Image (cartoon, rainbow, N blue to C red):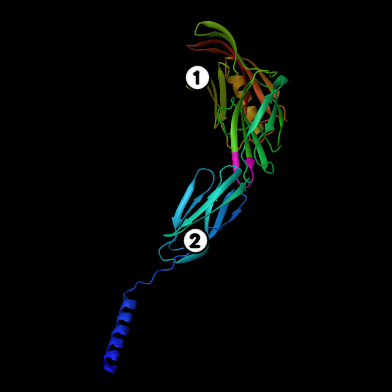
Amino acid sequence: MKATFSILSIFFVLLACQNKQDKIQPIPVTIPDATFRVNIDNSNTATFTFNLNSNEIYTIDFGEGSTHTDKLPEDYTKITNYYVRHHYSRNGNFKVILTIKNASYISEEQKNIEASNIAIADFSYEVLANGQVKLKNLSENKNGYYQWFIGTNALSNGNYFIHTTGREEPVLNFDLNGKYKIKLQAISGNTSEITKTIDIRNATKQMTFSGYYKDQKINIALDGSEFYYTSYVRDGIINQTIYTEDSTGVKSIILWKDYYFPFDTYLTKEKKYTLIRDFIKNNDSDVVELEEETLDPDLYNNIGEIYSKALWIRYKVKNEQLDGEMKIRLLIR
């Protein structure tokens, strides 16, 4: 009897051991931790920091229409202080949602954050009497640094500016009718800029053409309302152009006039101005009248680009489309 009991005992012990070996031990699955921290720098770049395990997938909804989903690289089992960066291109309040899930659990946390550190340039303007324009700075982030650039359509290259200022809301006194480009840069950890074109129609001075255009008698301003005038002075060439522009922006040139004068790279602006003045006076038989003008230094303050004097030229024009006299102001740069 004892022998039988011993044999049975051994059998059940072996069976129990076999059953223990046959059981698959469960892999422990932890609940994900979606707790996160956020830091926003001066450029509106947010850094989101949280903990992440290898069996987890995370998704961040940044609150402005975009999301990001990812997981750890295969050779990592866990990263403490895992981080994701995201740049907010506009200022505002955003609801950020972090979701982390594994095979068994989903964890989520949300926070309302404020990203308001970048400058976003914008402005409006009011045209007052006698060509005066009041600029109103509407840029976001008023703690930034501002720079205004004023260009004239009378200079064909838009990179030349007659006026620059760092005042927040300047008042400008335009002396000549025409179109002007106004660019505002707002700087605050980033640089944002916006350009608008304004029309001046009530200034004290005006460029004109009087005579015949396509056999029709006209007396018209060269201010961009119907006829545009542009010019440039560069490398021994003075170019003056009159053109029209349709509603789609297609330009039609009706006058192209070039002067070629002796050029010297090392001439000062004053000597260059004198050379051009004397060259036009002595070499262009179409010139009826030539006058000099001292420019308003408050408006034409970008002396690195624009010489302090201009030439008013009245001369005869005759081609297939025009027959008359044109009066223009030539800026020297």
Q: Is residue 141 above or below residue 53?
A: above
In this image, 121 relative to 24: left or right?
right
Q: Where are the magenta residues, as a range?
A: 186-192
Q: In this view, does 2 lie above or below 36?
A: below
In the image, 13 versus 4, the foreground residue is 4
Q: Where does the image place residue 77, in percent across and percent down from the top left?
A: 44, 67
Query: Is there a contact, CB below 8 Å, between mark 2 and mark 1?
Result: no
In this image, 100 relative to 175: left or right?
left
The residue that mark 2 highlights is 32
In the image, 210 versus 290, the foreground residue is 210
Identify the residue at image location x=54%, y=45%. Answer: 63
Q: Is residue 5 above or below residue 164?
A: below
Identify the mark nearer the N-term, 2 or 1.
2
The residue that mark 1 highlights is 247
Q: Where does the image place residue 143, in percent across and percent down from the top left?
A: 69, 44
Marker disc for residue 20 = none
Identify the residue at image location x=60%, y=21%. Answer: 280
